[in-house]
Amino acid sequence: MKSTCFENRELSWLRFNNRVLEEAQAESNPLLERLCFTAIFQSNLDEFFRVRVGNLIRKKEEDPKKKDSVSKMTPKTQLRNIYETVRTMTPARDAAYHEIMLALRSEGLEQVLIHSAAPAEQQMLAEWFKREIRPVCMPVIVDKGKPFPFLRDRQLYVVLRLESKSGIRMGILPVSDQCQRIIRLGAGGRFILAEEVIQAYAHTVFGNTRVIDSTTLRVTRSASITPQDIGELKTGDFRVDMELMLQERKRLPVVRIELSETFYQPALEYLCDKLHVTDDQVFYAKAPLDLSFAYECKNLLPNPKLQYERMVPQKSAMIEENRSMFQQIRKKDILLSYPYESIRPFLRLLDEAADDKNVQSIQITLYRMARDSRVIAALCEAAGRGKKVTALTELRARFDEEGNIEWSKALERAGVHVIYGPEEYKVHSKLLLITRKNRGKTESFTQIGTGNYNEKTAAMYTDYCLMTADPQIAQDAENVFAALDRNEPPLPQKELLVAPFGLLPPVLNMIDDEIEHAKNGEDAYVALRMNGLCDKTIMKKLIEASQAGVKIELLVRSVCCLIPRVPELTENIEIRSIVGRYLEHGRVYFFGTPDRMKVYLGSADFMPRNTEKRVEVCAPVKDKALMQRLFEEFRLQFTDPAKARFRTEDGEYHLPANPDPANNSQEALHRAAYLRAELKEKEEQIE
């Protein structure tokens, strides 16, 4: 099979982040939202370097000749391509940032540099430095006679080259997390960043030593720790092992250096030597090295015209406010669509389960939770009322490990049975099972989601929540939880698609069914909506289907290693990607034409980590009306004339030729939710 169909995963991800950057560049977006997209671009890139680049550097050291299974690139080749690509993206990010800030100046928001501050402002800033920084700063002098200090991951540092007759001598000052990042100059929107002030007055910390050069520096450290690393830390207590791993991760090697401006080359070479990085891992930026302050700018300039129009998650038209959730789910399957519809009905279900004396047990898988989680509160309340509550808490949810460790302790204190699942497989499913007695008989209610049990992300990520009383789905869910309680990966089930053993085979079989329909001269169709696609087995099957004449539509937000429209290979495959106001997070699969379509939703992308290395759960959608709604929403997004970038045979993504912002699919879905809520309210008033 020709390799022209495939793209390297890491380079595909960089294409995705470039689409994020395009949202910062898009004049159709409000200015403050554009500014936030520059911060999203940066935080995405930070995580990419910490995880993906860190992992590649590790692979290069361990097995330099081992090639990526999709693109056949060695780690060294992948790293070279990554560095080259990022080096072209950074100036575009800087240009976008400065263009946005220039436009915001006329709206009343202005980032001031120290040399352009008024004399009175400079005096105030000098006093601020003496009052806020001098008492808490821990300056370090670096030269040949002293050990090099440890630099924290993503911490800002002001670095000074100090005059010396004996070689390289530098002073380093951290920009403390304890000091405010944005320093307001008066009551308006003028502000200066803390690192700018610290760099201006840092020379006062080092006595009479002359400062020759200065810069702001930021290092990115690897976060690549494997299950084998955790195994080496074994104490017999998995939670303790994870706590040790987190301490270990803080000291992993540096994978990137960022500088705010050019720096004396011998001093930079000295830094690189001490931090064990090469020249190609050094990046310069003309925008601030840490753009997280962008979100605070919305408070500095609270102008609604400069932000997205406020939209509130609506009441679901499927929900009756004065009727038990159990009664409603027993009557029919219920589908919620976040953030267009509120998460409250799901939270109601948990609260009712905690309060209902007939509820016997609650079982749930937890991956990422909100800081003040109502889900956790409901589970603790249920356990306190004597119900059997089991919560699988995934302690390996990357960068949420610390929070999940603390939640696991809180759940245990409340009497919840906390489990962690099989050692070899991360549990990424979003699965809830509630069992209760009803007139002497046992009944079960199952919820399957595409997104986490997190009230915060439910307002920012597009996700689906399916609630059903289907007995076979409940039995499958019970089997999944029983396996997890034994620390075993679940086996294939009758209705649920359950990775790592029971998701890939049925998906391939359903694509094979469409291939047979196409070979018989019938219309055949496959549509997939997900975050990422790089499972080579599935991609090969999609190519086979395309060659057989199956029409394939893929809506993939992020990584997509498959290239469409390649003659004789993928010419029947269309690929689109939406990056917009909300983060597209839902996973929905459609197999077959509308008259015989099978529909599934759940937690799994089609990436090897999901299909082979995690416990994932996807459920069939059986209700015809819900199937039709999901498909209509998929088609609305796939044909979005504003944000659905389409992929061409050269691998590039393009916006529609004449973008129509008025028909942005995310806003259209929100308007539809408003309309459904209004019609529901009118019906209730008539009744």
Image (cartoon, helix red, strand yellow):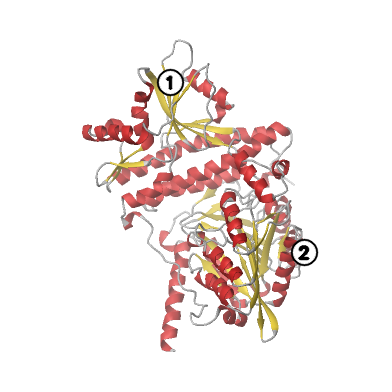
Residue 164, picture quadrant: top left
Task: Please state which of residues 17 and 382 is positioned toward the viewer in this rendering.
Answer: 382
Name the residue that disc number 2 marks: 492
Residue 684 versus residue 41 in the image, above or below: below
Q: Earlier in the sequence, mark 1 or mark 2?
A: 1
**Left or right, residue 315 beside residue 435:** left
Q: Residues within 10 Å of mark 1 (few under 14, many from 20)?
A: many
Residue at 48 percent across and 11 percent down: it is 166
Q: Please, which residue is most extreme toward the left here? A: 120
Name the residue that disc number 1 marks: 161
**Left or right, residue 94 beside residue 350:** left
Q: Residues within 10 Å of mark 2 (few under 14, many from 20)?
A: some
In the rendered image, residue 595, in percent from the top left (x then y), is placed at 66, 75
In the rendered image, residue 184, in percent from the top left (x then y), is placed at 30, 43
Residue 208 versus residue 394 in the image, above or below: above
Q: Secondary structure at mark 1?
A: strand
Residue at 44 percent across and 25 percent down: it is 262
**Left or right, residue 628 beside residue 102:** right
